[in-house]
Image: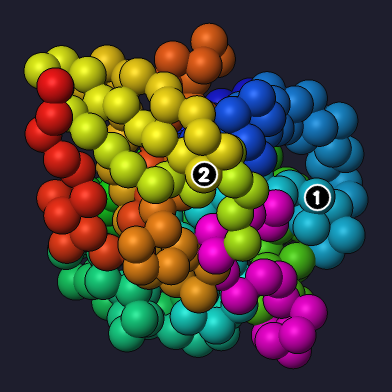
Amino acid sequence: MRLVANAVCSGARNGQGGGRTKWSAARQIVLLTFALPFLLSAAKPEAANDASKGEQYFRACAACHSLTPDHNMTGPSLAGLFGRKAGTLASFPRYSPALQASGVIWNEQTLDAWLAGPTRFIPDSRMPFEGIEQPAIRSDLIAYLKKATAANDATSGPRVGMPGDPDLKNLQAENKVLSITYCPDTYRVTTADGQTQGFWERNLRFKTDSSPIGPDKGAPALFGAGMQGDRASIIFSSPEEISAFVKRQC
């Protein structure tokens, strides 16, 4: 088994689950990563083109790819995939030059070759995924994609984020950041519940989310990202907010 699900999901947003003590969506992806090879090993080679099985396999892909039009994540939306030229979704700005120059049109045959080994099919493409060796599994997944990518928008999944991602406009007090100070090598973060936490500067990540469920301007969100509670991410509405929000104070 060479399917490496965690490679598919490596770009998934990290540290945005629940509160400080809740597991993040990224950790749930890790659990899925370990479980998926066992699910795939149970697949029967003769049962090909089974969209219901393909739907189960797609769960690993859903950390990086949406089925909703123009809802892009680590990877582009897959809505309307069949018949589309590779690297041409206008709303997705992060294609590799190799993919854009490939001239590939997505159909059952090209998707099968891509899923078998992306970098073998299109050298220098950047999808961090080794490939799926089993033809039946690829066939099931393609059968599901052909059905799901042509589905009505209302049944294609959430408009933004991964399933289960929190709405950062509706924060609990413990997640709503009021102030951030910096004194060499420590950030101190005060939240709306009156608590202040100190983080070593390398353990605090600043991120942005401009989507409809991103935080309001002036109300960044704090979410724990470390197994021991020593790491966290603060998510802002825009890059400009970051330097304006952090104050040097000892």
Name the mark on residue 209: none
Q: Is residue 72 above or below residue 96?
A: below
Magenta highlight: main SS:
loop
Q: Quadrant of residue 134?
A: top right
Secondary structure state at the residue bearing disc 1: helix
Residue 233 coordinates in the image, percent (x, y): 40, 37
Q: Is residue 219 above or below residue 131?
A: below
Q: Is residue 243 left or right of residue 31?
A: left
Name the residue beneath numbered marker 1. Answer: 56
Q: Element at badge 2?
A: loop
Magenta span contains residue 4: no
Seen from the viewer's position, the closer of residues 154 and 36 is: 154
Which residue is situated farthest in the top direction here?
228
Q: Name the residue rendered at 61%, 75% in the picture.
A: 159
- The C terminus - image quarter: top left
Q: What amino acid is labelled 2 in the image?
A: Ala
Please provide percent x and percent y for residue 137: 73, 47
Location of mark 2 (residue) = 192
Question: Alpha carbon of mark 1 to alpha carbon of mark 2: how far?
Answer: 40 Å
Q: Tell me which residue sits at (17%, 62%) in the image.
A: 240
Asked whether the viewer can see residue 17, the reply is no
Q: Is residue 246 left or right of residue 132?
A: left
Highlighted magenta segment, given as a residue range: 150-169
Instruction: Identify the residue shown where x is 65% and y is 40%.
Output: 18
**Amino acid identity at mark 1:** Gln
- Could you classify mark 1 by the number of other residues whose Cα lies within 10 Å: few (under 14), some (14-19), or many (20 or more)? some
**Left or right of 52 in this view: 150:** left
| Magenta region includes residue 164 | yes
Q: Earlier in the sequence, mark 1 or mark 2?
A: 1
The quarter of the image holding the N terminus is: top right
